[in-house]
Amino acid sequence: MDRLPEVLDQLANAARRAVAQSRDIDSRYDNKAAVGFDPVTQIDRDIETALRALISEAFPSDAIRGEEFGWTSEGARRIWSIDPIDGTRAFICGLPSWATLVGVIEDGDHVAGLIDLPVLGERLIATKRETRRNGALVATSKCRDLESARMATTDPYLFEGSETGSFERIRRATLVARYGLDALAYARVATGDLDLVIESGLKRYDLDALVAVVRGAGGVIGDWDGGEDWDGGRIIAAASRSLYDQAVALLSA
């Protein structure tokens, strides 16, 4: 456990090297989706391949769950969850908000997480005890009320059915809303610059890294019902318990 921050730092360095060495740096992409748009680049694959190799060498009995190549050793006690480029849409548009995410889950508990933002020169590494950005401790804003909350979601058009009305209630209740940030929004909750993130449709590799980062900074992260249904993909990250509970109540109103 004490090695995890060092290991996550090494993985982030390896991901950055994979980007620098990629054969496809001009960001050509394929669409993985049969309906809609879900881009993947060769750089996504190169990063995940590099991280899998390092994890498998250091922790051969651990499981790996990655966006591009699925599971290895499913059912192991410890899982490394990888999203090589969170925000591939941002990446192919030349925007700086994309990140490499690695979450570590042990016996079902999120024990460590990495959000690496190479273009911005920021790296957040978290354990259950703390979150650090580029080595310095960070903390949430502790914002307690929706009316003063700075809120974000990646794309308001990703909500479906009744979720659209639920999100609109949150948007109207908060001070300001910002869009298009992907994992950067959760990093900004951890650093105290945003107060609330509301999202739906996330996969485990999208969110596993975020849990430890938000919690290590003193924030609260869970599902829309106030629990921890991570597989449901409907996530709230908040700067405080009071703010989280208010968001849960308004989403279900």
Image (cartoon, rainbow, N blue to C red):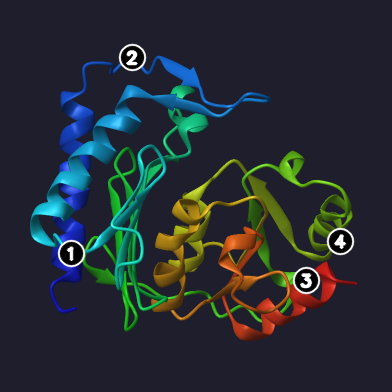
Give the mark count.
4
Residue 189 appears left or right of 133: right
Q: In the structure shown, which secondary structural element does the residue marked by tag 1 occupy?
A: loop
Q: CA distance from mark 1 to mark 3?
A: 48 Å
Q: Amino acid at mark 1?
A: Ser
Q: Which residue bears the numbered disc 4? A: 169
Question: Which numbered marker is on residue 147?
Answer: 3
Q: Quadrant of the C terminus?
A: bottom right
Label whose residue precedes the other's in the sequence (3 or 2)? 2
Q: Residues within 10 Å of mark 4 (few under 14, many from 20)?
A: some
Kindly identify which residue carries mark 1. 61
The x, y position of residue 248, in whole percent, is 75, 75
- Residue 105 vs residue 204: left or right? left
For label 3, the crowd category at 10 Å Cα-Cα, with few meaning under 14, some 14 to 19 and many 20 or more, is some
Closest to the camera, between mark 4 and mark 3, is: 4
1 or 3: mark nearer the eye: 1
Say few, some or many: other residues with alpha carbon within 10 Å of mark 1 (under 14 / 14 to 19 / 20 or more): some
Residue type, numbered disc 3: Glu
- In space, the residues marked 2 and 1 are separated at their CA atoms by 36 Å
Q: Amino acid at mark 4?
A: Arg
Vertical relation: 60 (above or below) 192: above
Which residue is more in the foreground, 208 or 146?
208
Judging by the rendered image, the residue that carries numbered circle 2 is: 26
Q: Earlier in the sequence, mark 2 or mark 1?
A: 2
Which one is nearer the viewer's eye here, 30 or 190?
Answer: 30
Q: CA distance from mark 2 to mark 4?
A: 40 Å
- Decide which of tag 2 and tag 4 comes sooner along the chain: 2
Q: Earlier in the sequence, mark 1 or mark 3?
A: 1
